[in-house]
Amino acid sequence: MSLSERAAELDALDPLAGKRAEFDLDPELSYLDGNSLGAPPRVVAERVADVVRRQWGGRLIRSWGEGWWEAPERIGDRIAPLVGAAPGQLVVGDSTSVNLFKVLAAAVRLRPGRDEILVDGNTFPTDGYVAEGVAGLTGHTVRRVPAGELAGAVTERTAVALVNHVDYVTGALHDLPSITAALHRSGALAVWDLCHSVGAVPSYLDEAGVDLAVGCTYKFLNGGPGSPAFVYVARKWQDDFAQPLPGWAGHREPFAMSADYTGGQGITKVRTGTPDILSMLALDAALDVWETGTLAEVRRKALALGDFFLSCLDELVPGVRVLTPRDHARGNQISVAWPDAERATAALIDRGVIGDFRPPNVMRFGLAAMYTRYSDVLRAAEGLRELTR
Ligand SMILES: Cc1ncc(COP(=O)(O)O)c(C=O)c1O
């Protein structure tokens, strides 16, 4: 059977084909960048129009009392099952970078007497910058260690380690339960960045005993450009979590307008300022595509898409250097090293295959399984073959 016959057969048998129909996507495009910006579920445009016309335009300021104010916790609870968290431990708002600052600064305060922050050596840059920023304020030092070596690198000086669940360049999946357990054995806290795993790879934060986590919602959760991020604070830390950016929205009685700050109950104290309602309610609508069992189906299909893509590459572009683990210790993306990767990415985009480029020479192909077809990954491999000619 040829690769195109195989792709057509896999697409015809795809149990998620119905989900693709819930997205606004040009059938002529092969969109392989959902790991950077997810595609819009159809329901979003109509819901945002309702928020603008009816809730904002019609109800005006009354809408704050009709669900807007509680949206950060309510939407956090909608994301919670996707990361294996019981309700009351996630809140949505701010960017991942700002939330990283909050959780790292709070984490070091939870571990007095320890003067070091470990950071995953290949981390997305913002995590490293924020860790340095926190360290500069608190007198800690930052040590960068490859994620695979963190378990052996933690010492009694380590207050906290910040680790990416999925490496944004290579797509390697790090072992969240075992790294968390190793950190805990040495008395350090575990902060996980779930940006590249939420909505792609199940994580079981409660079961693994994770302390704190952050993640963004504009990738595999399809929340829209710049949609607000989330913070997870395990229930066990919520009383002691000292909010380093206290703001009125996280106050126990925000509308009492007190001059003194008292943090809100539970996860609420992680809030800082007025929630970004338009983005937040676009995300709320985008979450409608998730039903019980969807994440397991997405993960299963993304691994199958990746396996099929690898077999297409092996046949059509033999010798290509794949940076992503070929076994299933990977997130929902495949990355390849390519000479002049930036130009090659642009050339593929011209042919209707949208992936992205990361310096110095990496082409990334995201496998957002709700809407990515087997024929899309075949087209990407065919495009790469063209470039070698
Ligand atoms: C792993 C990771 N962490 C953090 C960020 C940055 O998030 P934000 O721009 O929302 O602060 C990104 C953005 O792509 C990311 O991939």
Image (cartoon, grey):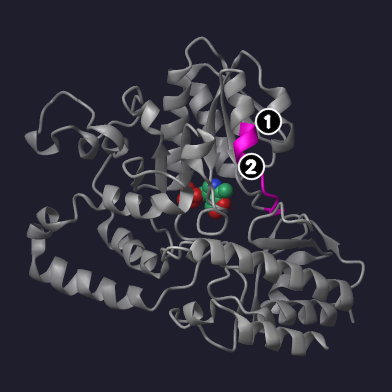
Picture residue at 61% right of the left edge, 40% below the top: 176
Q: Nearer the viewer, residue 321 or 292?
A: 292
Q: Where is residue 324 drawn, in percent x and y?
A: 76, 56
What residue is pinned by disc 1? 144
What residue is pinned by disc 2? 123
Relative to 258, is 21 above or below?
A: below
Q: Where is residue 229 drawn, in percent x and y?
A: 41, 50
Q: Where is residue 259 drawn, in percent x and y?
A: 13, 25
Which numbered disc, 1 or 2, marks the residue that appears first in the sequence?
2
Picture residue at 46% right of the left edge, 34% below the top: 212
Decide if residue 117 is in sight here. no
Residue 219 part of the magenta segment = no
Q: Amino acid at mark 2?
A: Thr
- Judged left or right of residue 3, residue 157 is left
Q: Is mark 2 within 8 Å of ligand 1?
A: yes
At numbered mark 2, what does the secondary structure look like: helix, strand or loop?
loop
**Neighbour class for label 2 at 10 Å: few (<14), some, many (≥20)?**
many
Q: Which residues are magenta?
A: 169-179
Inter-mark Cα distance, 1 to 2: 9 Å
Picture residue at 79% right of the left edge, 58% below the top: 326
Quarter residue 146 falls in: top right
Quarter residue 124 falls in: top right
**Neighbour class for label 1 at 10 Å: few (<14), some, many (≥20)?**
some
Q: Nearer the viewer, residue 220 or 52?
A: 220
Q: Amino acid at mark 1?
A: Arg
- Assess whether mark 2 and mark 1 are in contact (beta carbons under 8 angstroms): yes
Quadrant location of the N terminus in the rendered image? bottom right
Determine the main secondary structure of the stretch shown in magenta: loop
Relative to 290, is 246 above or below?
A: above
Quadrant location of the C terminus in the rendered image? bottom right
Relative to 160, is 192 above or below?
A: below
Q: Where is residue 21 drawn, in percent x and y?
A: 47, 83
